[in-house]
Image (cartoon, grey):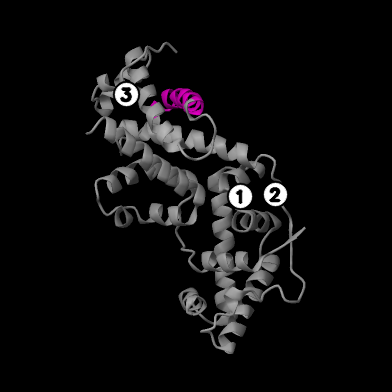
Amino acid sequence: MTEIQSDSLRKLLHRILTTRPEELGCETCCEELGLLAELESRGEDAASLLPLVRLHLENCQSCNEEYSALLTALKEAQSTNPL
Amino acid sequence: MILCPVDQHTIKSRTNQDWLQALRKPASPEALEELRAILMRGLRAALAGRGNGDVDALAEDFAQEALLKILASLETFRGESQFTTWAQRIAIHIAFSELRRRRWKDVPLQAFTQSQDGNELTPALLTSPNSSPEAQVTRRDLLRNVEDLIFEELTEKQRTALLAIVQDGFPLPVVAERMQINPNALYKLLHDARQKLKQRLEQKTGLSGRELLAFFEEE
């Protein structure tokens, strides 16, 4: 059995207090990552167009990691095969 | 699957419809190889510098697995992005899911217990030199309330998952796999837990979540 650490409680408190009534799950968010990546690559205001996806990425390290990787992959594709 | 080598500079510019048409059965070997080359390039870039070993071998394996998944999922492509972006997203999801699984496979989920009354909640972060003693006490009380509520209001499953992610740094999909539920269902379980804790904190303190947040984060 492990005790909860103080810095974990503080992180958790922030996460609790920033909870919104509507949030996306990981799989739903994942389906939108391609569109978000293309919008951001074109310099469009993706955060206001897909606010729930952006919110999910701020709160989910795994999805955020995959999103960053997708941006890297798309950048690589554009550098070798510009649109 | 029959593939033929392709020079990346010969990759055609295809529309989404072209891709779908070329990859539906019987899939064009040329289109398959072009897509594999695109996935390989993206995966190599995405995996580079992450300390995952032989990036080329990993990219090869994941690209192959992704190709099979993409071919099986063509009818789910909604056309909201370019086809190749959608395909890259699937490849990256496959790669990162597997790498997470490998990294965490030997780490057990822990059960948590409530801390004994004592000095656990007196870290430096609560005692900013700019904080008044009253503010420090209130912050400490707030954290104690959160801890109490975690044990009073949450199910064991909610508590274990929430703390595994926040304290131990487990990726949510790994926790979901251990608990044998899908990641969306786990996200919902945790969202319900956070909403419940937020409501109870607001009731206990008579302050809104926004007010509590502002108070806690002010220095």
Position of A32 relative to B113 (above/below): above
Task: For the N terminus of chain B, give its image quadrant.
Answer: top left
Measured as percent of width and height from the top left, residue B186 is found at 58, 49
Residue type marked 2? Leu
Q: Amino acid at mark 1?
A: Phe
Q: Are marks 1 and 2 in contact (CB under 8 Å)?
A: yes
Q: Which numbered disc, 3 or 2, marks the residue that appears first in the sequence?
A: 3
Which residue shows up at 54% across the image and 35% down it?
B52
Q: Nearer the viewer, residue A23 or A43?
A: A43
Pinpoint residue B148: horizontal percent, then vertical percent.
68, 71
Drawn side of residue B102 relative to residue A30, left or right: right
- Disc 3 marks which residue? B20
Residues rendered magenta in the picture: B57-75
Quadrant of the rendered image containing residue A32? top left
Q: Which is more foreground, mark 3 or mark 2?
A: 2
Local crowd size for mark 2, using a 10 Å CA cut-off: few (<14), some (14–19), many (≥20): some
Tell me, yes or no, whether dots 1 and 3 are on the same chain.
Answer: yes
| Secondary structure of the residue carrying numbered label 1 | loop
Examine the rendered structure and indicate whether residue B92 appears above or below residue B216: above
Q: Chain of mark 2?
A: B
User: In terms of secondary structure, what is the magenta stretch mainly?
Assistant: helix
Determine which residue is flagged by label 2. Answer: B109
